[in-house]
Image (cartoon, rainbow, N blue to C red):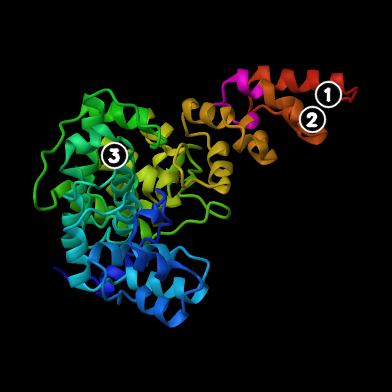
Amino acid sequence: MANATSPEHRRGYCQLTVATPIDVSQLSPLSRKLLDSSTPAPLRQMAAKGIAPGLRPGEALTVIVLLSQSDAGGIAEVARATLSGLPGPLLKGALSEALPAGVLEVLAASYATSAPVAEKLLLHEGLPFEAVEHMAECASEEVAELVATNEERLLAHPAIIEKLYMNKATRMSTADRVLELAVRHRIELHGIPAYREAAAAIAQELIVEASIEPTPDDIHFKDTEATANQLPCDPSVEDTHRLDETSGAEIVDEKFLPLHQRLATMTVSQKIRRAMLGTATERLILVRDSNRLVAEATVKSPSIQENEIVRISASRSVCEDVLRVIALDREWTRSHQVKVNLVQNPRTPFVFAAKLIPHLREHELKTLAKSKNVPGAVAQAAKQQLSRRRVDV
């Protein structure tokens, strides 16, 4: 068994509270004594460290998990530290026994980056689907591969597919493969914000078969991530594109050309996943992608921030589908600047612009009424709004 106390494991430790209650009444009298707050602290601290003579490994581990969730601060900290690096013999012995679901859930989250331990956990007959879901969320690349091999489990509990897809450590080829599995079995994945777009892209592409080694697509996906991390962009003060003085069109700023070129060579499904997991810089590029599935998926990213939406809603090179998504989102349209940008953007469908015009301020309406850069219908609607407020244009 691999050393569970290695620095690599500790960095990947994903703490989890017990989701499934553990029935203390089923434990031995000694275990219940160690869990009793009236028991001398030194004995409880020893148990928190995994030292409990007379207890089988599985029950000793159960005690550690319960102590890690207790109100006794000092003892709980000791137990949590023990969980992050359990002694090999204790862990090996415990995994060979029946364990409460709550204990398995904590182990699955705690050892989501330790492939040797995760492999044994995934074979444990009592492992609940929720535990695998937590493991998939925190998994390292190697562990994500192990989780993805059990298609029967993925189909029985699709939330595992969602967590794998949204985990940055999961290979692109593996994310494609599990997504294709869901599409093929007509499973709706509500935990992936842009699932409709991703599923449509998968349906159009040839899915790469699972392989032991990373594929060229996997390497390209990782290299693109590295390039993006080297080119940060704060949407509050800059954009990845600038206006060309000659044509008046938006073109990619030279600073971001390396990233733009990498993204341009990706498949549609790869672009959608980068939109879900990538940086603000990537999203500002991908939202302008010629493929509407990519562009629309970008504004559905769980990582997107208001300053990005402000920037995107003002862009005249994004497609109307993107502006429609923004206009229909109540959270984004709480921002007054987003409202103004949408109304001023000639690509915004008039039906949405018209609904936002009553929320604009007087000076903004006057500007709109006189502007030659907005559709005539928008300018006319602004004049009508001013008339209702009895204000001269």
> Which image quadrant for residue 157?
top left
Label 3, label 1: how many angstroms apart (C-alpha)? 52 Å
Q: Quadrant of the N terminus?
A: bottom left
Q: Amino acid at mark 3?
A: Ile
Q: Is residue 105 above or below residue 48?
A: above
Label 1 crowd (10 A; few <14 / some 14-19 / many >=20): many
Residue 374 % position (x, y): 64, 26
Can you identify the residue that label 3 sits on?
161
Under mark 2, the amino acid is Lys
Q: How many marks?
A: 3
Please identify the quarter of the rendering in which residue 182 is found: top left
The residue at which mark 2 appears reads as 366
- Residue that badge 1 annotates: 386
Spot occupied by residue 327 in the image (x, y as percentages of width and height): 58, 29
Relative image position of residue 44 (x, y in whole percent): 41, 76
Give the amino acid at mark 1. Leu
Q: N-terminal of the two: label 3 or label 2?
A: 3
- Mark 2 touches mark 1? (CB < 8 Å): yes
Q: Position of residue 56 (x, y in %)?
A: 23, 66
What range of the chain is rendered magenta? Answer: 343-353
Mark in front: 3 vs 2? 3
Mark-to-mark CA distance, 3 and 2: 51 Å
* In the image, residue 300 lies in the stretch drawn in magenta: no
Q: Toward the viewer: 211 or 50?
A: 50
